[in-house]
Amino acid sequence: MSKKDIVKYIIDEYGVTSPNDITNALKDLLGETLQEMLDTEFDEHMGYDKYDQTAKKDNYRNGSSKKTVKTSQGHIDINIPRDRNASFDPVIIEKYNRDISDIDNKIINLYARGMSTRDISESIKDIYGVDVSAPMISKITDKIIPAALEWQNRPLHTIYPIVFIDCVHFNVKTENMVVKKAAYIVLGVTEDGYKEVLGIWVGENETAKFWLSVLTDLKNRGVKDILIICSDGLTGIKQAIESAYPGTIQQRCIVHLIRNSCKYLSYKDRKEYCHDLKRVYSANTEQSALENLDRCQEKWGNKYPYAFKVWRDNWNEVCSMFNYVPELRKIMYTTNAIESLNSAFRKFTKVRTVYPTDESLFKSLYLAQDKITSKWNIPYANWGVIYSSLQIIFEGRV
């Protein structure tokens, strides 16, 4: 959920009309967060969930007592759970502590940072000066999952002029082994020119069936049309797009093509080769681009024939971009939007070398995108020019 969505939710849910209403809304949200974390800590202490009738019990729940604590948002009432043995000694809100105004923001950040259980445990120890078990930390962070699933299944816009599809690989434990798993990211550009992460899918193999399920998911969430899909020729995606969105133009990602062709070159030749290659994808027309590709191949082809096979084999999915205005083409062949997003994902999750489950990876990426997209508050430059050209090219669809 982006900052804009959070603000809208607070305004709608709490009827915000004044600064005082905002303070009350934040106070209420903080109270709910603290209560949920406290209840989770109590479940961990008891060794069974509240409504678990099958667990073997040597201690029983005994209601709760009301406690008023001071926070940066004012005084908040919290219900402290009790047990019959009177053995519960809360860590989140210590027994005799009624002032948490200096740590409540840290608590919320811990809840939404997506760190490993060990890192969170160490942070809580730093804040509270006590040890908290990893299982309790896992239960606390698992509270994020419903919000993540709600985000993954949220309604989307009817039309996205441009959609980028790519994947990032992470180490995940599977059956006592660490394996590389892909997280497939779908990034859309709205009709207003804003970027939006449409969804994240973890762990599936690339097949036409898989990609059809992803695109069908987008359709079920309200996406009726996509004008251009830009991807790196992922296995099975071409057939899936033709089935789900037959009118969509498939555009090969220029950044990936450059990278794929460069892997056949020696390092010392790459800079000069890329300089020559830029004349291909930055040409004004397809004819001019092909002429520049021929010249580039005459210069480098004998030494690196496979570098040009990449371009020749995929030209039918490259040439469509020469129908677009330079402002739109620039989005595709400069710093690719989804490449920047993937780089941000890697930076955000670099503290984790291995994820214990697919779910933990999804949870972490959900939190990462929430942080990343909160800064996406302006549309693409010259979007008016781009959108006007798309209205001409795709007449009747936008």
Image (spheres, rainbow, N blue to C red):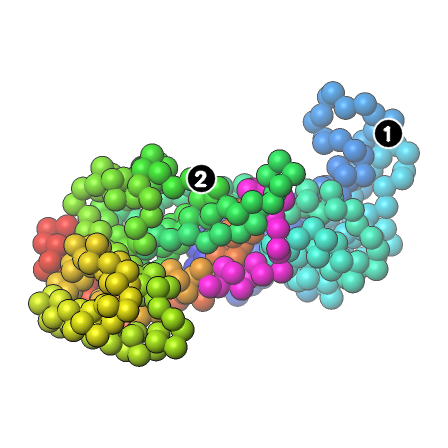
Cα distance in 3D space between marks 1 and 2? 43 Å
Q: Is residue 199 magenta?
A: no
Whether residues under marks 1 and 2 lie with C-beta atoms below 8 angstroms apart, the answer is no
Q: Residue furthest front?
A: 302
User: Tag 2, which secondary structure?
Assistant: loop
> Over which residues does the magenta segment extend?
343-360
Residue 194, by quadrant, is bottom left
Residue on which the image places disc 1: 59
- Residue at position x 87%, y 26% in the image: 58
Residue 314 location in percent, x, y? 22, 55
- Answer yes or no: is residue 217 visible: no
- Residue at position x 62%, y 60% in the image: 351
User: Tag 1, which secondary structure?
Assistant: loop
In the image, residue 314 above or below residue 297: above
Residue on which the image places disc 2: 204
Q: Earlier in the sequence, mark 1 or mark 2?
A: 1
